[in-house]
Amino acid sequence: MGMTITEKILADHSGKKEVFPGELIFVKLDFILANDITGPLAIKEFEKIGVEKVFDNERIALIPDHSTPNKDIKSAMQSKMLREFAKRQGIEYYYEVGRVGIEHALLPEEGLVLPGDTIIGADSHTCTYGALGAFSTGVGSTDLAYAMATGEIWLKVPESIKFVYYGKLPQWVTGKDLILYTIGNIGVDGARYKAMEFTGEVIRNLPMSDRLTICNMAIEAGAKNGIIEPDEITLDYVRNRAKRDFKIYKSDEDAQYKEVYEWDVSDLEPIVAFPHLPSNIKKISEISKDIYIDQVYIGSCTNGRIEDLRIAAKILKGHKVHKDVRLIITPATPNIYMQALKEGLIEIFLEAGASITPPSCGPCLGGHLGVLAEGEKAVATTNRNFVGRMGHPKSEVYLSNPAVAAASAILGRIAAPWEVEVKE
Amino acid sequence: MIYRGKALKYGDNIDTDVIIPARYLNTTDPKELAEHCMEDLDLNFKEKVKEKDILVVGENFGCGSSREHAPIAIKASGVKCIIAKSFARIFYRNAINIGLPILEVPEAVDKINEGDELEVDFDRGIVKNLTTGESFNTFPFPPLIQEIIKKGGLINFAKERVKGGSL
């Protein structure tokens, strides 16, 4: 019987010829990571186990990206714990402020997560790396502690669901809209415990940035992992970055899927997810033109890449941010920041009246650098709009792609990209 | 393991951002986390849980972020165990790994009212509603997970592997 790409990677990493959905296995890990929120807890648990050294100091990344540059004393203590543990253990990939980026943008850029890998991270959006054709999933701190000691994790082999997208995406419609549309259709638990395999001509034509955005939000449908078979676009992306060898896996023709969804997305519009669930979606044309907003946030592990900033800049060029709106933009990594500077994007943003933050997860999870007050509404290119996600429990978050976010910043309300004149 | 207590009920898709908001994630201290557990959903949680210490919840409990601070906050607030229609996968792992007993019994949840007296038998996978006299069965955990639970979590499981020389 054929296997899916997810099953093949898991079989190969557990010393088995084949694995079956539902089977509990121990899997050898190629790379693991934690951040300044989950890392300290993982370190505490690791130190209880009774082993001296981590399993491999070149296969662990510790990334202080959530509350950095440190927002308060307690956060500073957490970062310090990460820093000291990294030194003590000789951990190769510890990133200090100034060199740190948002983990899920940084690690693919650095060539540390690769096709065919098994990866776990103490961060739910670790599923992002499935875009490279890896098995990658988010876990908690104790799982990470166990993995730091052993290089392994216990896993249940997931059933796979296949999503096939046909047609050609219209202008201003992106990977973000595809994944919001998908979550809206299957629900926030529609892929619970399962692997989401994304395929079809639309995916094949998407650049890596959109593919990373799609797999990034697999967790928002409850999935264990999202995955896209590697192709030439993947190889072009990893070839000059890869810090290790890697292996390409593909699903067999006769692989078994729990469900298959097939959608023609030629008529898809930009999608906005209303409070308070990512599945609560509306097409941009269905949204009334009187949802006034206080803040727009463009950034995060979902949409803080250079391609996202280019889209935002295209819309913002020559325009001003609405007087009642604060526009906050976060380039996800120092390299992206530098590239945006070279391309003149930062100048466009500053001239429009935006604030640029250092690379950080800050605002997305209501940590710092742009927390919402009671009753405020924000359009954000992030991944979650739960109650209180970006600040006060009575604030509201509307999730969108970068084009909708930029247009909304100019018009002061949720707006379609075509409502703004693009100035060359 | 058998737990007895009263039911405290909440709905579907309770996410980890409301279980423990990110503004409190600058600590790992269980007591401090418990102080703020569920406060964005129910300001009276802390009071209610003193009397009703078995959480009975709907679908996809614990969805969202991987923060283990969520099950830690729940456990430290005095909750004995959780019965859900379903759990989000990272929360499910985290609860097992830190030794917070959880059980998926979808058909039981709608037939339990807040305040009902419950008896939960984890070894046999049985939930009894002592108030109504109804009883519900589910599959017990697979052997590996049972072993982790019996040892009190993944770290104890790892310690024994270290002692046994297999690590």
Image (cartoon, rainbow, N blue to C red):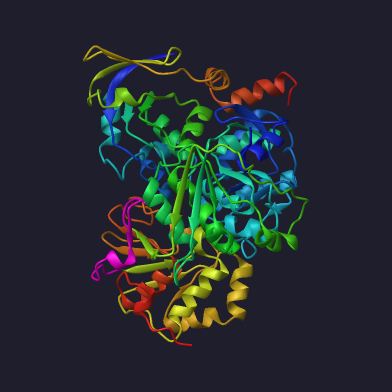
- In the figure, is residue A188 to the left or right of B99? left
Identity of the residue drawn at 53% across and 79% down: A346
Most foreground residue, B84 or A6: A6
Residue A281 falls inside the magenta stretch:
yes
Left or right of A274? Residue A212 is right
Residue A318, picture quadrant: bottom left
Magenta stretch, main secondary structure, is loop
Assess whether residue A193 is covered by the magenta stretch: no
Residue A75 percent location from the top left of the image = 51, 52
User: Nearest the camera: A30 or A349?
Assistant: A30
Q: Name the residue nearer the viewer: B69 or A223.
A: A223
Residue at position x 42%, y 66% in the image:
A297
Is residue A342 visible to us here? Answer: yes
x and y percentages locating residue B166 in the rendered image = 74, 23
- Can residue A73 be seen here? The reply is no
The magenta segment is A274-293
